[in-house]
Amino acid sequence: MDKVEKLPSSIKTIWRIHAVLEYVIFALIMGGVSFFRLVIPNAATGYFNIIFYTINVIGFIALIGSFFFVNYLWTFWTYYIDERQVELHKGYFFRKQVIIPIARVQNVTLKQGPILRSKDLQKIVIVTASGMSEIDGIMSEQADQLKETIMELAQEAKNDI
């Protein structure tokens, strides 16, 4: 692989579903917090309502914002693999570039939950001694191919040392 690759565009749907699920969990927690209104004194109810509704509005704005930023995020999420390294580029406000030397790769794992499976995507987890990095979603056939390629390159690099 000698060129910078982008994630498949179907990952945008996965990111949107993830944002909705996060908001649903947030709404359930806020629904549970709303029961505190029943036990607080009437004098504090006004302050509680202001804070409660402000947090709900901020959560909803965050959901809408994440929907708008999905395309922008996808534009900047790229990866590059060659015989020396794996490079990951991501982020839209705060850009992050991760370079993993092939010789340091210990393991490559493929993950696929039900949401990724619905779009035939897999997450690639690259493990080194110092941590792990992920490629969010690659088509399943390509993910298997990348896993084999990275592990072969890592084995060759370790044999050269």
Image (cartoon, grey):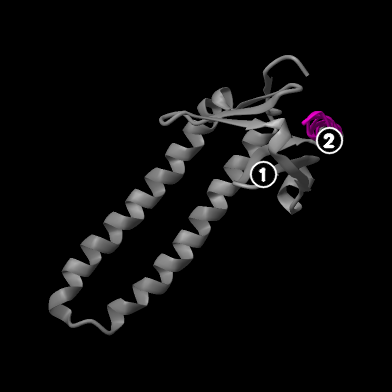
Looking at the picture, tell me which residue is in the foreground, 117 or 5: 5
Rendered image quadrant of residue 150? top right
**Which residue is located at x 46 percent, y 60 percent?**
26
**Which residue is located at x 28 percent, y 77 percent?**
37
Tell me the kind of residue under disc 2. Answer: Gln
Q: Residue furthest top?
A: 2
Q: On screen, 34 above or below 38?
A: above
- Quadrant where the C terminus sits is top right
- Badge 1 density bin: few <14, some 14–19, many ≥20, Cα 10 Å: some
Callout 2 secondary element: helix
Callout 1 secondary element: strand
**Which residue is located at x 75 percent, y 53 percent?**
114
> Residue 27 at what x, y percent from top left?
45, 61
Q: Is residue 160 magenta?
A: yes
Looking at the picture, tell me which residue is in the foreground, 106 or 117: 106
Judging by the rendered image, the residue that carries numbered circle 2 is 155
The residue segment tinted magenta is 145-161
Q: Residue furthest front?
A: 161
- Quadrant where the N terminus sits is top right
Q: Left or right: 85 with respect to 130?
A: right
> Residue 79 at what x, y percent from top left?
65, 26
Q: On screen, 83 above or below 103?
A: above
Q: Which mark is residue 128?
A: 1
